[in-house]
Image (cartoon, rainbow, N blue to C red):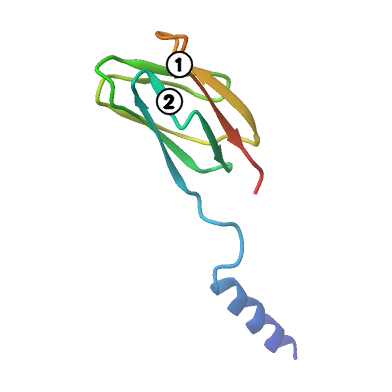
Amino acid sequence: MRRALVLATLALGACGHGAPAPKAYVVKVHGMQFDPAELHVHPGDTITWQNGDLVAHTETGPGFNGFTDAGKSWTATAPAPGTYPYACTLHPMMKAVVIVEAR
């Protein structure tokens, strides 16, 4: 009986039950704005900022601190659950937020 329980537990584990795999998200930087301006992710997900503008931008805030030259990108991993506003320090009117939700 115990052996059957162990085998059943192993079979369930092999079916992919457990924590979901991290997802990848993209924020497009174009027209002097972040798109999307509000992004919902989970801890461990990755976020890539792709700069399509002709000038450099930063993505600076309490959860992220990146720099993207024109035509370049950078990637960060979503931190613990919380709300993380960020802005471009070179162009302060550019603002957005990443909301990290618990799984």
Compared across the picture, whether 95 is left or right of 18 comes to left
Question: What residue occupies the far bottom of the structure in this picture?
Answer: 1
Q: Residues within 10 Å of mark 1 (few under 14, many from 20)?
A: some
Give the residue number, with chain letter if any, for mark 1. 94
From the image, tell me which residue sits under label 2: 34
Q: Residue furthest front?
A: 31
Residue 70: x and y, percent?
26, 20
Res. 69 image quadrant: top left
Compute the Cα span from label 1 to label 2: 7 Å
Residue 24 position, x and y percent, is 43, 45
Where is 6 relative to 87, above or below? below
Q: Position of residue 12 (x, y in %)?
A: 61, 76
Q: Which mark is residue 2?
A: none
- Counting from the top left corner in percent of width and height, residue 82 is at 66, 32
Whether tag 1 and tag 2 are in contact, CB under 8 A, the answer is yes
User: Which residue is drawn at the image coordinates 50% and 43% (left, top)?
Assistant: 45
- Residue at horizontal 32%, vertical 29%? 73
Residue 3 in the image: above or below residue 78: below
Q: What residue is drawn where x is 56% and y is 57%?
A: 20
Amino acid at dot 2: Phe
What is the quadrant of the N terminus in the image?
A: bottom right
Work out whether mark 1 precedes mark 2 in sequence or the reverse, and give the earlier one. Answer: 2
Q: Secondary structure at mark 1?
A: loop
Amino acid type at mark 1: Met
Q: Residue at x 63, y 36 (%)?
A: 80
Quadrant of the image occupied by residue 2: bottom right
> In this orientation, which residue lies closer to the viewer: 20 or 41?
41
Exactly how many numbered labels are in the figure? 2
Tell me if mark 2 has few (under 14), some (14-19) or many (20+) residues whose alpha carbon lies within 10 angstroms of its own.
many
Please indicate whether residue 16 sits to the left or right of residue 102 in the image: left
Q: Tag 2, which secondary structure?
A: strand
